[in-house]
Image: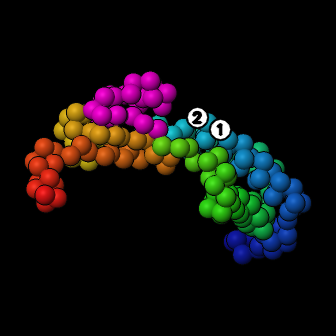
Amino acid sequence: MNTFWQIDWHSVFVPSVSLVEIFLRGTLVYFFLFIVLRILRREAGAIGISDLLVVVLIADAAQNAMASDYKSITEGIVLVGSIVFWDYFLDWLGYRFQVIQRLLRPAPLLLIREGRIQRRNLRQEMITIEELLGQLREQGVEKVEEVKKCYLEGDGRISVIKKESKDHQAKSKKLIS
């Protein structure tokens, strides 16, 4: 029972590994994972179970590369801080510089033009017709022919611009006349 209250305060707060090394490890793994996920992943809508699993497995696999068997809270804080720092700093750079923004977030990808599905772009992003139709239904579109343009945005959301209905066009003409 006596060992329950004995705490090695030195190992709790004093790092056993250089804080610069931990920051460097966190930085390198962050950029590696960022590049891998940026190249390989762009979602259509929401995150799926398999995508969540990939993120969890990557985090677990990367932990050893980042950690170097650290034991103190200080080392953990520095490691998490380095990852948060780079995440925030890249967002800040993207906000300030358009060139960086283009690297961080892909440009919108046209999926439908004038009611015609752009199959090559769907194939490029591995989006099935069923997934696309499901996203259209969520936005109140019943038929592909109703869509003027549909894009896969850089953050994975689908945006839809509907064609104007004939009734709406007729009303607009009356208002202009």
Count of marks placed on residues: 2
The colour mode here is rainbow
Give me the residue at 38% from left, 44% from top.
158
Quarter of the picture containing the N terminus is bottom right
Estimate the x, y position of residue 167 in percent, counting from the top left.
10, 48
Residue 159 placement, left or right of 170: right
- Furthest residue toward front: 177
Give me the residue at 35% from left, 40% from top.
150
Give me the residue at 27% from left, 39% from top.
147
The reply to whether callout 2 and callout 1 are in contact (CB within 8 Å) is yes
Residue toward you, 170 or 18: 170
Examine the rendering and report whether any part of residue 47 can be seen. no
Residue toward you, 50 or 166: 166
Residue 57 placement, left or right of 131: right
Callout 1: few (<14), some (14-19), or many (20+) C-alpha neighbours within 10 Å?
few
Q: Quadrant of residue 132?
A: top left
Point out which mark residue 36 bears. 1
Residue 116, magenta (yes or no): yes
User: Is disc 2 placed on a helix, strand or loop?
Assistant: helix
User: Is disc 1 placed on a helix, strand or loop?
Assistant: helix
User: Mark 2 — residue?
Assistant: 40
Magenta extent? 109-134
Determine the CA span between mark 2 and mark 1: 6 Å
Residue 171 placement, left or right of 1: left
Three-letter amino acid code at disc 1? Answer: Val
